[in-house]
Image: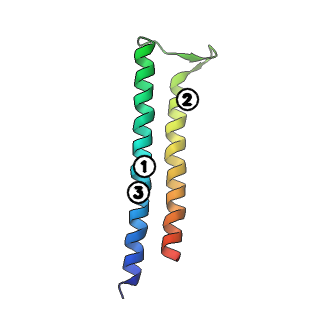
């Protein structure tokens, strides 16, 4: 009777683990962005003189959340399945 509940709990732990890791990675990306802003004295640094560096950091944050969300869902599904 409790077997499905144990699987659901394990899947929830997997999802929570992926969420925590993604938060740590996004915090590191945010910290790096703060360091770059301090290095450039508040001015917006540009990549190749065209693209604002903040676009790179924002893209990194979105990619990190997306990959870990998808990966977490896949792993949680595998946990529930087997």
> How many residues crowd mark 3 within 10 Å: few (<14), some (14–19), many (20+)?
some
Q: Name the spot of residue 60 as percent of width and height, x first.
A: 53, 36
Label 1 SS: helix
Label 3 SS: helix
Instruction: Choose the circle earlier in sequence order: 1 or 2.
Output: 1
- Residue 30: which quarter of the image? top left
- Residue 2: which quarter of the image? bottom left
Q: Name the spot of residue 27 as percent of width and height, x first.
A: 39, 37
| Residue at the disc numbered 1 | 21
Tags 1 and 2 in contact by the CB under 8 Å rule? no
Q: Name the spot of residue 16 as percent of width and height, x first.
A: 39, 58
Quadrant where the image shows the N terminus: bottom left
Q: Name the spot of residue 70 as percent of width and height, x first.
A: 54, 56
Residue at x 41% of width, y 81% of height: 4
Residue at x 48% of width, y 74% of height: 80
Q: Tell me the mark number nearer the camera, choosing from 1 and 2.
A: 1
Label 2 SS: helix
Instruction: Choose the circle earlier in sequence order: 3 or 2.
Output: 3
Tags 3 and 1 in contact by the CB under 8 Å rule? yes
Mark carried by residue 17: 3
Q: Tell me the mark number nearer the camera, choosing from 3 and 2.
A: 3
Residue at x 51% of width, y 41% of height: 62
> How many residues crowd mark 2 within 10 Å: few (<14), some (14–19), many (20+)?
few
Marks 1 and 2, Cα distance to the nearest angstrom? Answer: 20 Å
Marks 3 and 1, Cα distance to the nearest angstrom? Answer: 6 Å
In the rendered image, the vertical position of residue 7 relative to residue 76, given as above or below = below
Residue at x 52% of width, y 16% of height: 45
| Residue at the disc numbered 2 | 56
> How many residues crowd mark 1 within 10 Å: few (<14), some (14–19), many (20+)?
some
Mark carried by residue 80: none
């Amino acid at each position: 009777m409790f077997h499905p509940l144990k699987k659901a709990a394990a899947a929830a732990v997997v999802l929570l683990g992926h969420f925590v890791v993604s938060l740590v990675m996004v915090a590191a990306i945010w910290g790096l962005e703060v360091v770059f802003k301090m290095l450039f004295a508040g001015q917006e640094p540009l990549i190749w003189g065209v693209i604002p560096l903040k676009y790179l950091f924002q893209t990194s944050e979105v990619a990190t959340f997306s990959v870990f969300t998808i990966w977490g869902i896949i792993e949680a599904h595998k946990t529930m399945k087997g």
